[in-house]
Amino acid sequence: MKFKLIDITKQLEMKYDIGTVECKVLNTSANYAVEVMSPNGHYALKIYNPNSRTATDVQWEIDLTQHLINKEVQVAAPVAGSDGSYLQSFVLNEIDLTVVLFDWVPGDKPKPELSTYRLIGEAAAKMHTASDSFSTILEREEYDMNELLDDQLKRMKLSLEQSGQWQRVYDLTKRMKKIVSNPKLDYGIIHNDLTLDNVHIDGDELYIFDLDSSAKSWRAAEAWGVLKAHEDRFESWLEGYRSVREFSKENENAVFAFVIIEDIRNIVWKLGFAKSSRGEPLIKTSELPKVVDEWLAWERDVISSNK
């Protein structure tokens, strides 16, 4: 879906007290985002994908954001419209879409250095600690085993069958469930997409944005992408996290299983089967055998050696 910048600009100037604006569309994957410059400040306009987020979903995100700000977690702050509401409705391509304007956080996208991952681990721990006291009457999906594995298998079942991978993946998910069924694992709200794309670093300070994927899940899932990228980065992440909050050996071991569990959800998105998928699929069914081989190799070579 493509939007005309003139339509976005007009509605920004009409619904927010920020003066004349200049806009630039940002390259995003699930929702849509626009960089906004005005004499009054620097902002990011988030246009929510109606296929994956309702206004209630967005309100939950804003409520969590405000709670974290009150707990002194450095996250991007929402900007109220002229009517005092953080949630606004823009008509784009003749569709009513929920939007929120956020302050642009200081700094820049960081480099993938070990010091960066230490700061990300520290920020994750601060967010987890602060969110323990968050409460709301609004409903939110949880990334439990049903959401992370059962639902993902349903969404990709036909592709798995067509590629001859169904039984291999079904058996693999049963083994992953056994690993994360440990009642000692920490469970609560996580950012769920705490990557270099969703943080800025300004000097020694790290700022978080884009809490759209936040929900309750296992805290061990927060670090799966860091571990998958490189174990040295994961060690730095752990060091930062443990400087703020406990992360037990059981949680540490579970991260290795979440490399597979979360990547299954990632592959479903790339196949175009997730609610938030948009545009052309990024992978084809014919590529699944190679993907499954990589999952099984990780289980054999990495998870088994960490038991």
Image (cartoon, rainbow, N blue to C red):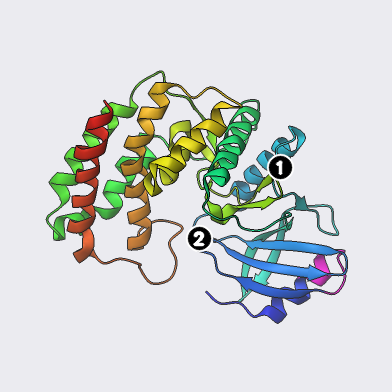
Residue 30, numbered label:
2
Label 1 sits on residue: 74
Q: Position of residue 24 (x, y in %)?
A: 67, 74
Q: Quadrant of the C terminus?
A: top left
Q: Is residue 274 above or below residue 280?
A: above
Q: Is residue 214 left or right of residue 15?
A: left
Indicate the amino acid at tag 2: Ala
Q: Give, as a single range, the part of the protein colored magenta.
A: 12-20
Q: Tag 2, which secondary structure?
A: loop
Q: Position of residue 171 (x, y in %)?
A: 17, 38
Q: Quadrant of residue 279?
A: bottom left
CA gap between label 2 and label 1 equals: 23 Å
Residue 189, numbered label:
none
Q: Given contact means CB atoms under 8 Å apart, are the residues at marks 2 and 1 in contact? A: no
Is residue 17 shown in magenta? yes
Is residue 235 shown in magenta? no
Q: Residue at x 53, y 31 (%)?
A: 239
